[in-house]
């Protein structure tokens, strides 16, 4: 099993147009996932293994203040979704599990959004267990926490403007640190 779960540091604020920062995050949060997958794929093919990609709701829905991070997570969704299809078409028995995580109580996440995000974070220990379980069971996607991640995706498809409104209401913009 190959578990891809690493990210580069980014800011939580309005997008400042820093293209170099975006390129750096794409190298860490996206291209390194591809490089590691390419390196591990021969062994995973032989062992009928699994690839577990830890991603985010920010890779499915446009959340404010996360442009560089979010762009890399959208890229992961696209790449690993196409790779899953191509492996199936070639009858290669390697599963790909995409983990769609909401706000989890990791130190870096909580510190980054303190006093701005008005949502209670989910437990990191429970999240880690769900990631491992999803990969071991070869699930297509893991949503953690389920209701907090799956329901917004359903709303996105049926009432995108309403979802945008709900997202904006979950932020205390006055507490956003100004650059």
Image (cartoon, rainbow, N blue to C red):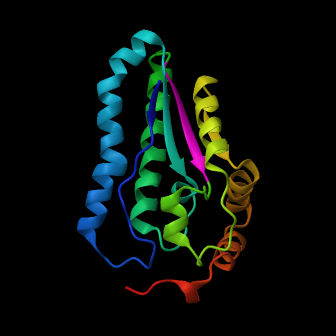
Residue 90: x percent and y percent?
Answer: 44, 17
Name which quarter of the figure residue 18 lies in. bottom left
Name which quarter of the figure residue 155 lies in. bottom right
Residue 13: x percent and y percent?
Answer: 45, 77
Region of the chain picked out in magenta, as a range: 94-101
The C terminus: image quadrant = bottom left
Residue positioned 56% across, 86% down in the render: 175
Residue 25 part of the magenta-drawn span: no
Residue 122: x percent and y percent?
Answer: 67, 55
Residue positioned 43% across, 68% down in the render: 67
Residue positioned 56% across, 73% down in the render: 114
Residue positioned 73% across, 66% down in the render: 159
Of 51 and 74, which appears nearest the observer? Answer: 51
Q: In the image, 20: left or right of 14?
A: left
Q: Please determine whether, in this image, residue 100 is positioned above or below residue 162.
A: above
Q: In the image, 81: left or right of 41?
A: right
Can you see residue 62? Answer: no
Residue 100 part of the magenta-drawn span: yes
Q: In the image, 100: left or right of 40?
A: right
* Main SS, magenta residues: strand
Q: Please determine whether, in this image, residue 16 is positioned above or below residue 3.
A: below
Q: What is the count of numbered marks? A: 0
Of 10 and 76, which appears nearest the observer? Answer: 10
Can you see residue 48? Answer: yes
Residue 8: x percent and y percent?
Answer: 35, 55
């Amino acid at each position: 099993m190959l578990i891809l779960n690493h990210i580069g540091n980014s800011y939580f604020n309005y997008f400042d147009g820093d293209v170099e920062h975006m390129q750096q995050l794409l190298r860490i949060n996206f291209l390194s996932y591809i490089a590691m997958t390419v390196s591990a794929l021969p062994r995973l093919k032989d062992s009928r293994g699994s690839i577990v990609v830890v991603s985010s709701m920010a890779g499915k829905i446009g959340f404010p203040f996360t442009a560089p991070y979010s762009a890399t997570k959208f890229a992961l969704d696209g790449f690993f979704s196409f790779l899953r299809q191509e492996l199936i078409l070639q009858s290669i028995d390697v599963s790909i599990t995409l983990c769609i995580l909401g706000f989890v109580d990791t130190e870096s996440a909580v510190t980054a959004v303190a006093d701005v995000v008005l949502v209670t974070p989910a437990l990191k220990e429970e999240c880690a267990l769900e990631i491992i379980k999803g990969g071991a069971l070869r699930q297509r996607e893991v949503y953690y926490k389920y209701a907090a991640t799956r329901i917004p995706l359903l709303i996105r498809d049926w009432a995108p403007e309403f979802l945008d409104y709900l997202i904006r209401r979950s932020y205390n913009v006055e507490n956003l640190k100004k650059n």
